Image (tube, rainbow, N blue to C red):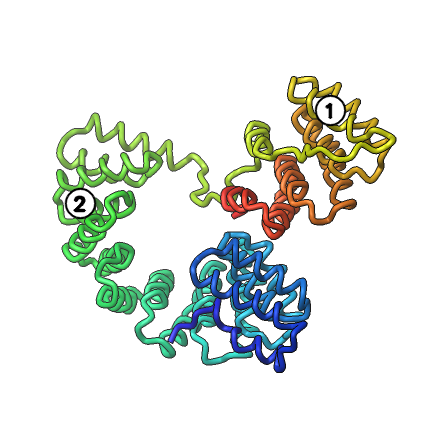
Amino acid sequence: MKKNPILLFVFSLFLVFPTLVKAQKTAAEFFEEGVTKSKAGDFMAALQAFNQAISMSPENAPSYYNRAMAKANLKDNRGAILDFDRSIELNPKYSDAYLYRGISKAKQDDFRSAIQDFSRSIELNPDDSQGYYQRGINRSRLENYRGALQDLNRTVELEPNNAGALYARGNVKLKLEDFTSALTDFSRVIDLTPKSPSAFAGRGYARIKLNDFNGSVADYSKAIELKPDEAESFYNRGFSRSKLEKYEEAIADFDQAITLDPQNYRAYYGRGFCKSKLGNQRDAISDLNKAVDLNNTPTDSKVVYAGRISRTILDELRGVVQERNKINELSTERSEALFARAVGKNKQGDGKGAIVDLNRAIELNPTYYEAYFTRGMVKSAMGDQRGAVLDCTSALKLNPKYAEAYYVRGLIKHSLGDENSGCMDLSKAGELGYTQAYKVISDYCN
């Protein structure tokens, strides 16, 4: 039976709090609130509840674990890993903390370290199918197909109807060229999930390798019916039809494959081959030329990283931050008045004049963290990103809970190419309640 990871440690809370005295009750209530919010899918509210539980009871491993799960659901895998680390530090036998830390690491493409976590999870809980499944998937990513097959075999032993494991095992068997057995796995997946286009496509490919082209056409037709925007399915159905000498039907499939994926040189080759068979040599040569040209162009089919934050994007994302220009009692050095005047000058487009006033405000009141942050914002808008980072850092030294400063510093670091540190700052901003950070994390940190 599959577990609900969010609720795994509700009971362990009571092991941590065997006798809830009044001073501990509030921490327990915050923990329960976090669990309830997580069950409802409100992970931002859950995260804030777990923050409170941790602040009141900082040695409670389940609170860190559940906060990590909330962060993972918000796609903040870096932040999740830090909380899983703390959970494991407090309870080294926490098998699910290893399991889900491994999943977060895998989402950061740290497959080797993820495998170590899955192995530790298996040591602690050898009958949990998820540990074997995740280790098998990640071994496959590292092209250790025989090790992956062993893990997925064990997963299926523990969960015979696990469609995900059967599908993954089918793909591993394709890599090991065990096409007959792969076909059996994909057929079982189809029995369990009759509307899985990837299962039909997998079985169709196994049938190509077994020279069952009629069966392959049938499977890819079903895959296309279920998912009509998959170029590879059209290509493979076209290939099977060309093997059956149904050249006009094959050309129609290759046309669609090229429409969906203009870089699919194999589809140009297949279409050119079929046109040649039909006597259209001029168009055939054109397609074959395209196939050769595309095939000689280095391409990387996997987009590892979508690109750092550009200056335009930085300006847009930073622009949502509102300065904290609230009236305060005027001190004798009048730093507050200088700060307010700086904000006004900046709004009028006088960034240089704003910086002069902010410099003076900081000189008069060196603990004025809002002045440091605002000066950083102005510097960033004027293109001095490194100076802006220094000012945000100064603001955070004075106020470590300044969520907006983490957010802006994270944006700027990311734009300067320091993606990991930038994303960690964004994670901290989100943890402190600045919800805008999670949208940026989702777009630029995964």
Q: Which mark is residue 342?
A: 1
Judge left or right: residue 288 versus residue 275: right
Q: Please name the amino acid that badge 1 sits on.
A: Ala
Judge left or right: residue 180 versus residue 382: left
In front: 342, or 289?
A: 342
How many neighbours does mark 1 have within 10 angstroms: few (below 14), some (14-19), or many (20 or more)?
A: many
Q: Is residue 209 visible?
A: no
Above/below status of 262 relative to 425: above
Above/below status of 429 relative to 328: below
Image quarter of the N terminus: bottom left
Q: Where is residue 182 in the image (x, y as percent from the top left)?
A: 29, 65
Q: Please name the amino acid that badge 2 sits on.
A: Ser
**Quarter where residue 58 is shown:** bottom right
In front: 371, or 78?
A: 371
Q: Residue 242 carries which label?
A: 2
What residue sits 17% from the left and 54% below the top? 213
